[in-house]
Image (spheres, rainbow, N blue to C red):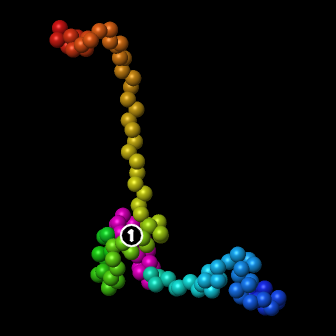
Amino acid sequence: MALAVRECGVSERRACKLLGVERSSYRYEPQPDRNAVLRQELIALARQKPRYGYRRLGVLLERRGHKANPQRLYRLYREEHLAVRRLRRKRLARPEVAVATLQRANQEWFRWTL
């Protein structure tokens, strides 16, 4: 875009229109991460205490003087992939039980009463 403006002498508005880019997107400058310090502290604590969740880590952060609401902590916790993987329960392999086919109504009930 800047090349078209400098080299061809066209206006920024015309260059954006030719390339199909919004001018607001072209002029956008990203803001610095305001959570950088909190993020680093959270990562450091999570490395020391890997089994702690975001709530418990939040309490430790408060003790260190970092005040952050739980939603922000949870978002940072997820973004940094700090959650401990949950193990799935293994299913027991049960042996096949010989199932008698029922021939009439209440057959099982009668079998136990005899």
Which residue is the site of mark 1? 74
Give the total number of marks visible in the rendering.
1
Looking at the image, residue 47 lies above or below residue 99: below
**In-image side of 22 versus 105 (left or right):** right
Q: Quadrant of residue 42?
A: bottom left
Q: Quadrant of the N terminus?
A: bottom right
User: Which quadrant, please, contains the C terminus?
Assistant: top left
The kind of secondary structure the magenta stretch mainly shows is: helix
Is residue 17 positioned above or below 53 on the image?
Answer: below
Looking at the rendering, the stretch of residues picked out in magenta corresponds to: 37-54
Q: Secondary structure at mark 1?
A: helix
Instruction: Please name the amino acid that badge 1 sits on.
Output: Tyr
Specify the farthest residue to the right: 8
Residue at image position (32%, 69%) is 55
The image shows residue 75 at horizontal and vertical percentages of 42, 70
Residue at (74, 84) in percent of width and height: 14
The residue positioned 71% from the left and 80% from the top of the image is: 17
Specify whether residue 36 is in view: yes
Residue 21 occupies quadrant = bottom right
Q: Which residue is more in the foreground, 29 or 100?
A: 29
Q: Is residue 45 visible?
A: no
